[in-house]
Amino acid sequence: MITHGLAISDAWAQGYRDEAQSNLEKAEVAARTDDDRNALALLQNEAGSLTAWWNGVLAARQNLNGATTIDPDALKNDTALAKIRACSQFLTSMLVSGAFADDASCH
């Protein structure tokens, strides 16, 4: 929705945040091995990065910062979002493989 410039609010994202938090809590309970706990730490880092990025988006909108909220290229040039995407892609491949690995984009 953000990519297409649609107005969204913190209330809209709350459901997604709640679900992500619930799933992280389930993963924490299920983590048995060192690799599980290391993967969990990467997932928690990613969730924290996404939350921090979203809070910045909301602050920019509330401050009517047109440079980041109206500019169609703002998201393309957003280094924090690029890092989140890279980590997300890495985590997906790692979790599908079933073997722990590490990547700097998730730190």
Image (cartoon, rainbow, N blue to C red):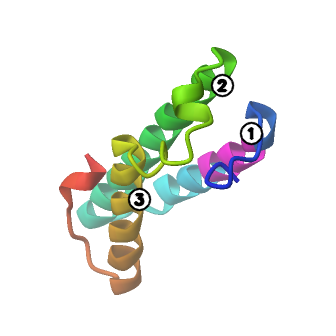
Point out the image quarter for the C terminus: top left
* Amino acid found under the numbered disc labelled 1: Gln
- Which of the two discs, 2 and 1, labels the residue nearer the N terminus? 1
In front: mark 3 or mark 1? 3
* Amino acid found under the numbered disc labelled 2: Arg
Task: Work out how far the residue at label 3 is from the one at label 2, CA to CA, in angstroms.
Answer: 22 Å
* Tag 1 secondary structure: helix
Q: Is 30 in front, or is 98?
A: 98
Residue highlighted by disc 3: 85
Q: Residue at x 42, y 47 (%)?
A: 81
Q: Residue at x 26, y 54 (%)?
A: 105
Q: Given the current orientation, which residue lies at the most extreme top position?
A: 63
Task: Work out how far the residue at label 3 is from the one at label 1, CA to CA, in angstroms.
Answer: 20 Å
Give left or right: position of 34 versus 72: left
Task: Work out how far the residue at label 2 is from the one at label 1, CA to CA, in angstroms.
Answer: 17 Å
Q: Which mark is residue 61?
A: 2
What is the crowding at mark 1: few (fewer than 14 residues within 10 Å), some, or many (at least 20)? few
Q: Is 21 in front, or is 77?
A: 77
What is the crowding at mark 2: few (fewer than 14 residues within 10 Å), some, or many (at least 20)? some
Residue highlighted by disc 1: 14
**Which region of the structure is painted magenta?**
13-21
* Amino acid found under the numbered disc labelled 3: Arg
| Rendered location of residue 93, percent (x, y) | 36, 78
| Rendered location of residue 36, percent (x, y) | 34, 64
Q: Are marks 3 and 2 in contact (CB under 8 Å)?
A: no
- Which of the two discs, 3 and 1, labels the residue nearer the N terminus? 1
Q: Is residue 20 magenta?
A: yes
Q: State the image quarter where residue 63 is shown.
A: top right
Q: Are marks 2 and 1 in contact (CB under 8 Å)?
A: no
In front: mark 3 or mark 2? 2
Vertical position of residue 19 compared to residue 90: above or below: above
